[in-house]
Amino acid sequence: MFDSLSDKLQDIIAKTAGQKELTQDNMQEALREIRRALLEADVNLRVVKAFISNIKDKAEGENVLSGVNPSQQLVKIVHDELIELLGKTVSPLDFSGHPNLIMMLGLQGSGKTTSSAKLAVKLKKEGRNPLMVACDIYRPAAITQLKTLGEQIGVEVYSEDSKDVQSIIQNAVNYAKDKGFNTLILDTAGRLQIDTDMMAELLLIDRVFHPAEKLLVVDSMTGQEAVNVAENFDAQLSITGLVLTKLDGDSRGGAALSVVYCTHKPIKLTGTGEKLNALEDFYPERMATRILGMGDIVSLVERAQEVFDEKTAKEMEKKMAKAEFSFNDFLKMQSQMKMFGSMEQLLGMIPGLKMSKDDRQKISHEGEKQVKRIEVMIQSMTPEEREHPELMNSSRKKRIAEGAGVPIHELNVFINQFEQMRKMMKGFSDVKKNMGSMMGKMGQAGAKLTAHQMMKNMRRFR
């Protein structure tokens, strides 16, 4: 996401690194480049003008021109303005109401139904009990699609064979109260374009049921059109927030940088992949740091906490300590790493890693290709061989290599690296154990010394 804009902004900032200070001349050149980069990223012209004007005002102050490296000054100014542009602070969902109602809005093809399912997954993970309500009674197979998604994620879908949307929602509310659901996600009808009938129905739902959230789902790949759609919906329905889909595929970022400024409504959630767990809270500051190539270590740590199960991690640690780490354990570890997201996404989150999109894609592609080859090699082993790596001999290796369709030397390289990794893990565990033992002895010695000192002091005061 934002790869094109990110690369250009980083290049512009790098050009100021050789300057002694920010002057009228070099700032004018930098601002022209930033303006061009934003327009090429399909950012709304109103937004570009305001953004450039604010940067110019801040950069021309006397306090900015003295003492600090010019590129650092420009990074700070652009960073602060990006945060401002993206909405300043995170905007959490409003869970008021019993039950709480979240109304999903959007045109056909924006990803509204899939986003409803992704939201249900997110809320379920956070401890809520969501119920999805099929309110799109016009689009063929809309209810079937929602039910299919509901089965995949283990979330119930309420639907009726009725054309009265108001009645469907009222019955769903009653059903939720009886069954203990605390959040209703209303997947409303969309159209190919905004029309009077659609808006009349949505306005009626809003006025009768007063949903706590009216989230407009917009496709970030549509750029300027996303802004037009958002402004139209907001003018008629007064939306509470936005959900940007396909943000992972939007290399320009024009929609994300424009919709908040143009609607004055926050981006609450972003879709960052096709998987049904790929819906995240939107953090303006984190996004600004990523656009400027400064990484996003907080999101990386949060994702790690979600992915790695503490119990599994402790079991792995015990196996490593005894050098019992098997090929099956290696596959489990690989499986958990995949839940992090693509290697390209992870590289983009690492602070200080200056790398172009092409380089990230190349490394990601090569890395993921190698991981698949390793998985094929392990899957070509017998269950016993996977659990006991020490059984490997020449004849077994030959059979495995033939089964995996890889050269024998490639299998040997992997097995040698695996054995080195096991030894290294065992070594780290021994060091940790010895350190713990040493610290324990030091603690005991300290306690004895303290006791001895106390006895001496007591004798002194007799």
Image: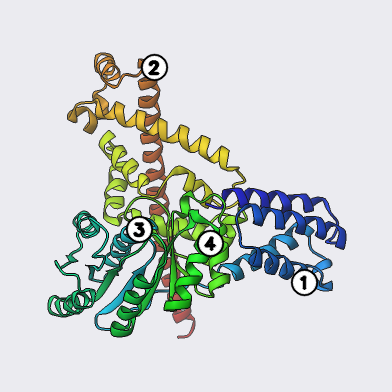
**Residue holding disc 4:** 256
- Rounded to the nearest angstrom, the CA distance separating label 3 from label 1 is 42 Å
Residue at mark 2: 409
Q: Name the residue tied to disc 1.
A: 57
Residue type for callout 2 = His
Tags 4 and 1 touching, CB below 8 Å: no
SS at circle 2: helix
Q: Amino acid at mark 1?
A: Asp
Q: Which residue is mark 3?
A: 306
Q: Residue at x 64, y 66 (%)?
A: 47
Classify mark 3: residues with Cα within 10 Å, few (<14), some (14-19) or many (20+). Answer: few
Indicate which label's residue lies in the foreground, 4 or 1: 4
Q: Earlier in the sequence, mark 3 or mark 2?
A: 3
Judge by depth and name the residue closer to the eye, 184 or 452. Answer: 184
Earlier in the chain: of badge 3 and badge 1, it is 1
- Residue found at x 35% / y 70%: 198
Q: Left of 238 or right of it: where is 17?
A: right
- For the residues labelled 4 and 2, say whether their Cβ atoms are less than 8 Å apart: no
- C-alpha distance separating marks 2 and 1: 63 Å
Q: Local crowd at mark 1 within 10 Å, few (<14), some, or many (≥20)?
A: few
The residue mark sitting in front, 3 or 4, is 4
- Tell me which label, 4 or 2, sits earlier in the chain: 4
Give the structural element (helix, strand or loop) at label 3. helix
Residue at screen point 38% across, 53% down: 437
Residue at 51% in and 57% down: 297
Q: Nearer the viewer, residue 9 or 462?
A: 9
How far apart are the two marked residues, 4 and 2, measured between alpha carbons? 49 Å
